[in-house]
Image: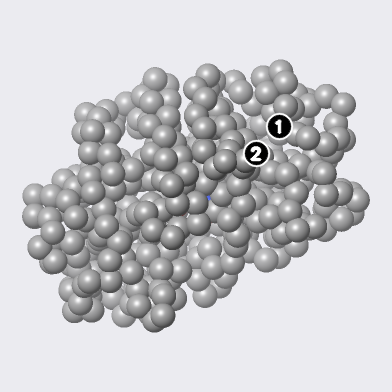
Amino acid sequence: MISLKVDLGERSYPILIGKNLLDKEGLLQQYIPGNSALIVSNETVAPLYLDRVVNSLKNINVKTLVLPDGEKYKNQDTLNTIYDCLLTNRLDRNTTLIALGGGVIGDLTGFAAASYQRGVHFIQIPTTLLAQVDSSVGGKTGINHPMGKNMIGAFYQPRAVIADTETLRTLEDRELSSGIAEVIKYGLIRDIEFLQWLEANIDKLLNRNTVALAYAIDRSCKNKAEIVAADEREGGQRALLNLGHTFGHAIETGMGYGNWLHGEAVASGMIMAARLSQHLGKISTDDVNRVVNIIERAHLPVNAPDKMSPEKFIELMSIDKKVSDGVLKLVLFESIGKAIITSDYSQEALIEAIKESY
Ligand code: NAD
Ligand code: GLY
């Protein structure tokens, strides 16, 4: 088992990565301070893994809640379903909310934990690659609004992240690729050696080679843990983790939540960011092709959705969380392997970069 630490002083927590951790005796239990827990999962993940997690807990009042599956359920109604369950079961302030699933379940459950009785204990058990390399780490929690992705939420750190790599065996290929998009992101924003490793090993990840997957999860989490420890609430460098996301969130919202997977939208968005960076003279055509190439090899989309006009992109991007005092900052490339956050681009160049992406 690999053990990493997200160093946040008194709120530090471990990321545990390994095989068959779901029901490893005593592992989850040690992070539950009280005598009650609610495990939140969904109708796809629960039949696969819920019983194993429940049965691993001894002498604890364990409740379970199985939600419908999908990004379109990451909303206020589903959040209320979690509150209803907590209240109906009279779960108190010392209860622990456990998210068992992908990023949707993690974000929803985390926000419920942040807000129920002003905050209860929270543990992440991520079961998608995307959740194991990104969403379960760092404490961003929240829900979508019809007008914008992840617009309502809170920073709320878990007590532990337990990533059982064996759960990735049941993941659909498209979901695996979606997770690889966030893995590629770390290479592109700050870890050129990791990008080179990905360029050499992407097929191993797609073939679910366990050693390669464990390495990619470990290296991704190390990158994320370092950034979160330095800038928990995104005052500065944490924003780099959003390479491609402003474009990507526009795609997710514009196409209807769930039609483009998060990683697919981010992949297409990272290419738009590369094109805009080229317009600004930061990177070369060869660099843009390098970004396109690794994304294409990961079986991810390299174009913008036909059904979304550049005007729609601009409209949706104008309500992104990186708009401050009316100015939209974007994560762009200083070079491949080094991202920057900047508002130093023209609207014309932005529109041109989007137009080139169809
Ligand atoms: P997801 O949670 O929808 O999971 C993808 C699909 O895989 C779902 O159908 C799910 O039921 C299924 N699934 C999950 N685990 C499985 C398993 N082991 N075997 C078979 N099927 C399984 O999507 P995701 O890609 O995990 O997460 C995307 C979400 O995460 C988005 O809402 C995105 O905004 C959010 N996100 C949050 C952060 C953050 O920092 N909080 C970072 C990145 C993304
Ligand atoms: N996924 C972006 C972040 O955690 O900041």
Please give the label number shown on residue 76.
none
Residue 289: tell me if it is visible: no
- Dot 1, crowdedness within 10 Å: few (<14), some or many (≥20)? some
Where residue 9 appears, as percent x and y from the top left, is 57, 41
Which residue lies under the disc numbered 1? 31
> Which SS class for mark 2?
loop
Q: In the depicted view, which residue is nearer to us: 92 or 228?
A: 228
Amino acid type, callout 2: Arg
Label pair 2/1, CB-CB below 8 angstroms:
yes
List the single residue furthest toward the front: 9
Please give the label number shown on residue 159.
2
Determine whether, in the image, residue 260 is placed left or right of residue 109. Answer: left
Lower sequence index among marks 2 and 1: 1
Q: Quarter of the image holding residue 215?
A: top left
Establish if 44 lies above or below 305: above
Where residue 100 appears, as percent x and y from the top left, is 65, 39
Where residue 130 appears, as percent x and y from the top left, is 46, 42
Establish if 85 lies above or below 75: above
Whether ligand 1 has any atom under 8 Å from the Cβ at mark 1 is answered as no
Q: In the depicted view, which residue is nearer to us: 259 or 17?
A: 17
Which residue is depicted at the point 57% across and 70% down?
145
